[in-house]
Amino acid sequence: ADTNNGTVPTPLTNYLDTQYFGEISIGSPAQMFNVVFDTGSANLWVPSQSCSPFSTACFTHNRYDASKSRTYIENGTGFSIQYASGNVRGFLSEDVVVVGGIPVVQVFAEATALSAMPFIFAKFDGVLGMGYPNAAIDGITPVFDHIMSQHVLKEEVFSIYYSRDPKRSPGGELVLGGTDPNYYTGSFNYINTRQTGKWELTMKGVSVGREMMFCAEGCTAVIDTGSSYITGPASSVSVLMKTIGAQLDESGYKVNCDTVKTLPSVKFLLGGQEYSLTQEDYILWQSQIEGEVCTVTFRGLDVPPPTGPIWILGANFIARYYTEFDRRNNRIGFATAV
Ligand SMILES: CCN(C(=O)c1cnc(C)nc1NCc1ccco1)[C@H]1CCCNC1
């Protein structure tokens, strides 16, 4: 692919500040899919033409049809991925996948069963894992690793911009091979990833206002471009929510919209820098039939040891801090998003 100076931008769609996805193609002729570029996982899956009609989540999305692709290569190995929020089952296939105009021959999963929760709410069809190879199920080489081995990228990095304003276009941007100065200001602060071969950092504390309330002894922060919210250990998040006067209901933590302007900043101490989120950044203000609803974009999630306890910094964090994922130096860079 003729990549302009070795960096390749892909525009992303922003759905309600909670889902960001971009278009890829699989097969010849091209079959188009909307996928989440997800640093929290390392496999590519899309719904399959052969999914059961009873799998509503599968049926309501674009589906890959191997019989219509002349570059399809059969594999058939079983596949199953388990997220905290749901699961995906299917089988492996191989075909030409094009991301940002760069073609790779890729082993991916055709999903034949998608759990209704949460995928009936997905505006995207599938997930393109941007994680490290050792996080990939079935030992499959991830898409970005195939792209790196083509030596078409200026740098072995990729960057993510998520817009905060649903009306703003583009809703976001993935850059393969570099960063896009149009979407950040100032310089990057870099933090080395832990040796785990995952996009995770050591966090030195979480403060509310001026008080450090959590993770003072150090904890793990996963930078997950595929998660909408920030999650932390349920006990910590419930204390944090009590501090800001949020109530938990069936669809998450809510605050009275009148109190939003008085809410404190929440700060994450990473690599000697404090990354602050103001109420602007962590409150999702939605006008619904019953009036204004203000959702706090934090969720409690207990990840069992040895992986957990962890904090997951998702889209609401990335929307504030433009993020560069550096595979060459195994580090993550943050700059203030514009
Ligand atoms: C994609 C699966 N994920 C979701 O959190 C998720 C689930 N279900 C829906 C409907 N949306 C999700 N993410 C929307 C989104 C897009 C970009 C930012 O957030 C996570 C699972 C763990 C690894 N990381 C990804």
Image (cartoon, rainbow, N blue to C red):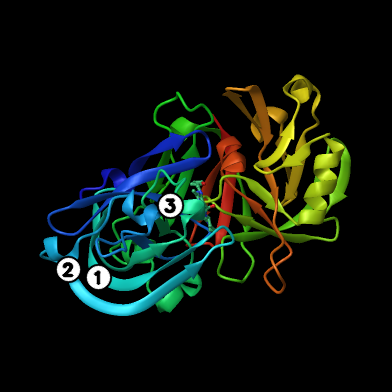
Of the numbered discs in the image, which one, if any, rests on residue 94?
Answer: 1
Neighbor class of circle 1 (other Cα within 10 Å; few <14, some 14-19, many 20+) is: many
The answer to whether residue 58 is above or below residue 248 is below
- Disc 3 designates what residue? 37
Q: Residues within 10 Å of mark 3 (few under 14, many from 20)?
A: many
Question: What is the C-alpha distance between the residues marked 2 and 3?
Answer: 23 Å
**Upstream in sequence: badge 3 or badge 1:** 3
Which quadrant would the C terminus be assigned to in this image? Answer: top right
Circle 1 sits in a helix, a strand or a loop, which is it? strand
Q: Is residue 66 left or right of residue 214?
A: left
- Asked whether 146 or 84 is in front, the reply is 84
Residue 60, percent from left and from top: 33, 48
Q: CA distance from mark 1 to mark 2?
A: 6 Å
Q: Which mark is residue 72?
A: 2
Q: Residue furthest right?
A: 211
Q: Amino acid at mark 1?
A: Glu
Q: Position of residue 153 (x, y in %)?
A: 33, 55
Q: State yes or no: discs 1 and 2 in contact (Cβ < 8 Å).
A: yes
